[in-house]
Image (cartoon, rainbow, N blue to C red):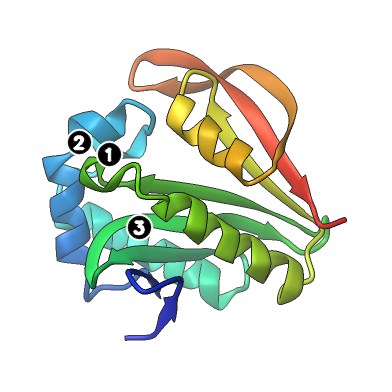
C-alpha cells in the first residue's frame, strides 16, 4: 500500500478496498458523532455502500478530479481527508475531512491539511484551496483558522444535515 508520511505518527494512504472494512467499522461505531456535521454517515448502512464510495473516489483520482486518503495514526486508520474536487480550469480544490472522535485534539487534521495544501500549490499548480464548514462546527473552523485561511462568506441554508438546515462558512487560502 502506497503511503505518504506526514510525521512520525501520521501517514496518508489512498482510499482503497483493503482498509474499507476498518473504515466502515469506524463509521458505524461513531455514526452519531460523525453525523453531527456530516450527512453521509447516515447513508452508509453497509460495507457495500462504503465500497461504492471507494469506487467513485478511485475513479475521480484516476481522472485527476479528486484525491481521497485514509488518515493513518500509528499505522491504524482513524479518518479520511480529501480533495473533494480538483478544478484545473479554475485552479482550485476543495478539502474535506473527518476524524474519529478518539483522535481529536492531536493536530492530525491540521497537519494532513497542510500536506494537501502543499500538494495543491506545489505539485498541482493550483492557486486556491477552499474548505466549506458548517457555521457552528467550531473544531473544523479552528482547523481553517490554524491554516491561516480567510473567510470568503457565509452561505445560508447550505446543507440539510440529517434534518437540520445549516449555514456554511467558506474558508479559502490563496497561493500568493
Depth check, front residue: 12 or 84: 12
Residue in the picture at 16% in, 57% down? 47
In the rendered image, residue 150, in percent from the top left (x then y), is placed at 74, 35
Kindly report which numbered mark, 3 or 2, lies closer to the viewer in this rendering. Answer: 2
Q: Nearer the viewer, residue 139 or 163?
A: 139
Vertical placement of 104 versus 61: above or below? Answer: above
Which quarter of the figure has residue 33?
Answer: top left
Q: Are marks 1 and 3 in contact (CB under 8 Å)?
A: no
| Element on which disc 2 rests | helix
Marks 3 and 2, Cα distance to the nearest angstrom? 16 Å
Residue under pointer 3:
53
Callout 3 crowding tier (Cα within 10 Å): few <14, some 14–19, many ≥20: some
User: What is the CA distance from the residue labelled 1 to the residue labelled 3?
Assistant: 12 Å
Q: State if disc 1 and disc 2 touch (CB < 8 Å).
A: yes
The residue located at (68%, 36%) in the rendering is 171
| Residue 66 in sight here | no
Q: Is residue 161 left or right of residue 134?
A: left
Depth check: give the residue in front, 74 or 85. 74
Q: Which quadrant of the figure has residue 155? A: top right
Question: Of tags 1 and 3, which is closer to the observer?
Answer: 1
Of helix, strand and loop, which one carries label 3?
A: helix
Query: Label 1 neighbourhood size at 10 Å, few (<14), some (14-19), many (20+)?
Result: many
Q: Residue at x 36, y 74 (%)?
A: 8
| Residue at left offset 53%, top offset 67% | 60
Q: Residue 14's image quarter? A: bottom left
Residue at which label 1 appears? 41
- Pick the front one: 162 or 140: 140
Placement of 152 over or under 23, stated as above or below: above
Mark earlier in primary sequence (1, 3)? 1
Amino acid at each position: 500500500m502506497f503511503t505518504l508520511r506526514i510525521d512520525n505518527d501520521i501517514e496518508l494512504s489512498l482510499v482503497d478496498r483493503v482498509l474499507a472494512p476498518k473504515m466502515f467499522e469506524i463509521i458505524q461505531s461513531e455514526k452519531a458523532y460523525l453525523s453531527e456535521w456530516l450527512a453521509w454517515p447516515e447513508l452508509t448502512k453497509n460495507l457495500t455502500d462504503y465500497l461504492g464510495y471507494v469506487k467513485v473516489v478511485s475513479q475521480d483520482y484516476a481522472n485527476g478530479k479528486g484525491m481521497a486518503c485514509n488518515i493513518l495514526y500509528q499505522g491504524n486508520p482513524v479518518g479520511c481527508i480529501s480533495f473533494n474536487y480538483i478544478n484545473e480550469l479554475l485552479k482550485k480544490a476543495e478539502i474535506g475531512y473527518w476524524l474519529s472522535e478518539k483522535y481529536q485534539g492531536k493536530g492530525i487534521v491540521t497537519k494532513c491539511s497542510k500536506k494537501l495544501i502543499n500538494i495543491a500549490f506545489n505539485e498541482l499548480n493550483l492557486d486556491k484551496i477552499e474548505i466549506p464548514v458548517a457555521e457552528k462546527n467550531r473544531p473544523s473552523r479552528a482547523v481553517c483558522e490554524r491554516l491561516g485561511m480567510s473567510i470568503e462568506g457565509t452561505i445560508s441554508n447550505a446543507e440539510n444535515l440529517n434534518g437540520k438546515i445549516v449555514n456554511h462558512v467558506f474558508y479559502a487560502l490563496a497561493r500568493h
